[in-house]
């Protein structure tokens, strides 16, 4: 019973179970814990919908023959490099 109380107030565990459920099967106990949490947590219910949508989009993207090209702009690269160097110099 203590584990059930812990998951009721634990969004981190709930999101872990949500992601685990999308990848593979979860145990009956985990399923019950997740359902109890989702009854009272609108944020995690929203996370369920977002995670499902992201998985669908990635699956569709991986199935297509045409792969999109993602390239970073030179300005962005320079700014990122400067930020990295600033952080390294702080230490």
Image: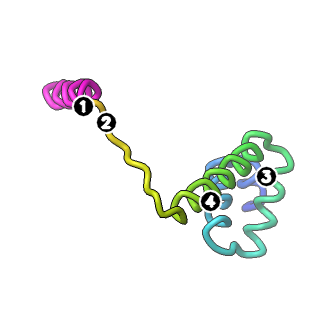
Mark 3 or mark 2: which comes first in sequence? 3
Q: Secondary structure at mark 4?
A: helix
Give the residue displayed 37% in from the left and 44% down from the top.
70
Mark 1 or mark 3: which comes first in sequence? 3
Q: What range of the chain is rendered magenta?
A: 74-90
- Tell me the number on the disc at residue 37: 3
- Tell me the number on the disc at residue 50: none
**Mark 4 near mark 3, Cβ–Cβ under 8 Å?**
no
Q: Secondary structure at mark 1?
A: helix
**Mark 1 near mark 2, Cβ–Cβ under 8 Å?**
yes
Residue labelled with disc 2: 72
* Mark 2 and mark 4: Cα distance apart in space: 29 Å
Image quadrant occupied by the C terminus: top left
* Mark 1 and mark 2: Cα distance apart in space: 7 Å
Residue labelled with disc 1: 77
> As rendered, which of 17 and 1 lies closer to the eye?
17
Furthest residue in direction front, as rendered: 66
């Amino acid at each position: 019973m203590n584990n059930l109380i812990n998951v009721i107030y634990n969004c981190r565990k709930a999101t872990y179970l949500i992601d685990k459920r999308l990848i593979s099967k979860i145990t009956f106990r985990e399923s019950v814990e997740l359902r109890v949490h989702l009854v009272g947590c609108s944020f995690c219910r929203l996370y369920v919908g977002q995670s499902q949508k992201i998985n669908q989009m990635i699956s569709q993207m991986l199935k297509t023959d045409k792969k999109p090209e993602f390239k970073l702009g030179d300005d962005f690269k320079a700014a990122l490099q400067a930020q990295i160097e600033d952080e390294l110099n702080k230490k």
